Amino acid sequence: MSRRILLIIGGGIAAYKSLELIRLLKKRGVAVTPLLTKAGEEFVTPMSVSALAGEKAHDDLFSLTDETQMGHIELSRAADMIVVAPATADLMAKAACGMANDLASTVLLATDKPVLMAPAMNVRMWNHPATRRNHARLLEDGVRFIGPEEGEMACGEYGPGRMAEPETIAAEILDLLEAGRIMDVSALPEGPLSGRKVVITAGPTHEPIDPVRYIANRSSGKQGYALAEAARDMGARVILVSGPVNQPIPEGVEVIPVESAREMLEKVKAEMPADIAIFAAAVADWRVKTAASEKIKKGGKGAPVLELAQNPDILAKIAKMKKDRPAIVAGFAAETENLIANAKKKLAAKGADLIAANDVSPGTGVFGGDDTTLHLVTRDGVEDLPPMSKREAARALMERLAAMLPAGEWV
Ligand code: CTP
């Protein structure tokens, strides 16, 4: 995998930290193309930036030679992602409005690559309604954020506004690059789901008891991961919100790792709207009401009693969303008796469009195994699929869901 970022350095006192960021990234094998705004140049010099990056520091939109050798489109095309650090209030405002009056803002408008911003500004600027609006707008546009952190600032005030530390930003960049969470949408195959966004949950959830113990189940994540691959092969942009599993990260799929049910719900919600949402995770129905902040020790008052609380039903919450509900919502029903009747009940109670019911009675080997027998239950009836591998079942289910998509409605 190529690992190159385009680093936009805005004009803030935190710009000096971007030098350390370049050093850390280079040390970890990530190439950095630096780009300084005019204001950024007031804080760090193009000379020191390019010496550390080992590359030319770009800075002028109207440089004729740059445009012929490496234009603003080419700059973003050559990188796996764009990082803005420090992201000033001004840069955020420009990006939120789609302005393009210098090289940095033009690149941000012209890119289809993932963008990560590390804001740095005075706490009042960060809290100002205009910046709140811009932040919300950028999140909506799919921009990722790291920080700002809370603390003492160069201006002597205290609060959120300090840029995240270079180590933290570098770790996030590596995580995004390595976890396959960053991908080139243009590299996806053409297919019936081209241009569509599919969100899938997979695996178990871990519900903490204390810092070292948790409640979990035996879900392997196989079915959810197979669905993600099937959707990708049909051309979809796939977001896989996955509990802790031992599955390899599928290429071309954006994996968002989570642990608990509540975390899974938050991440799924943050990905809405989507064209199709499939809930294949074996979400723990219960969590410990108040997880202990320290490891629970033996001795003293005998065995501890764990008070449980019910977890949110992620499928039902998404299916019942008033705004941004995916066009198609599908889930699974693992049953040991009254398979179809129970699946029909789940379809209605949760507000889903399709429930894939499977018999998990002891001896079927479905849970954790490679094969499955699905019965696709919709409001129109039941389709029984023959026994097949989870991979084949994933393909069959994705084809069925793609056919259910209303034509012409895109996220
Ligand atoms: N689901 C979910 N969030 C939960 C529980 C379940 O998203 N908190 C989803 C699962 O991913 C699956 C479907 O809902 O798609 C399963 O529903 P569930 O009611 O848990 O059924 P079973 O697992 O079959 O268990 P039970 O019959 O005991 O309710």
Image (tube, rainbow, N blue to C red):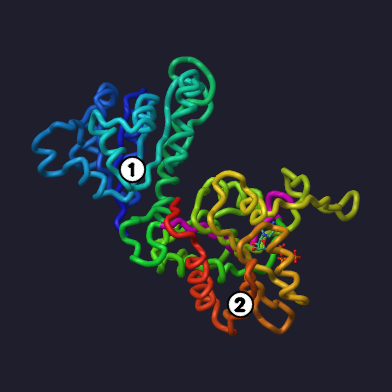
Specify whether residue 212 is painted magenta: yes
Mark 2 highlights which residue? 383
Q: Which mark is residue 369?
A: none
Residue 231 in percent (x, y) is at 45, 66
Q: Quadrant of residue 51?
A: top left
Q: Residues within 10 Å of mark 1 (few under 14, many from 20)?
A: many
Type of the residue with mark 2: Glu
Q: Position of residue 318 (x, y in %)?
A: 61, 51
Which of marks 1 and 2 precedes in the sequence?
1
Using the image, tell me which numbered label, if any, was put on residue 82.
1
Of 280 and 356, nearer the camera is 356
Front-most of residues 230 and 82: 230
Q: Is residue 199 magenta?
A: yes
Q: Quadrant of the N terminus?
A: bottom left
Residue shown at the point (49%, 27%) measured from the top left:
132
By secondary structure, the bulk of the magenta-drawn segment is best described as strand
Relative placement, left or right, of 259 versus 271 is right
At which x and y percent is residue 113? 33, 48
SS category of the residue bearing label 2? strand
Marks 2 and 1 sit apart, C-alpha to C-alpha, by 46 Å
Q: Is residue 118 visible?
A: yes
Amino acid at the residue labelled 1:
Ile
Work out whether residue 405 or residue 52 is closer to the camera in this orientation and state it.
Answer: 405
Query: Are the residues tagged 2 and 1 within 8 Å (C-beta)?
Result: no
Q: Which residues are magenta?
A: 196-213
Q: Is residue 180 visible?
A: no
Dot 1: element: strand
User: Residue at 57% across / 79% down in the picture?
Assistant: 370
Label 2 CB less than 8 angstroms from ligand 1: no
Residue displayed at 62% across by 47% down: 321
Horizontal side of 357 relative to 195 (left or right) equals right
Residue 53, position in %: x, y? 25, 41
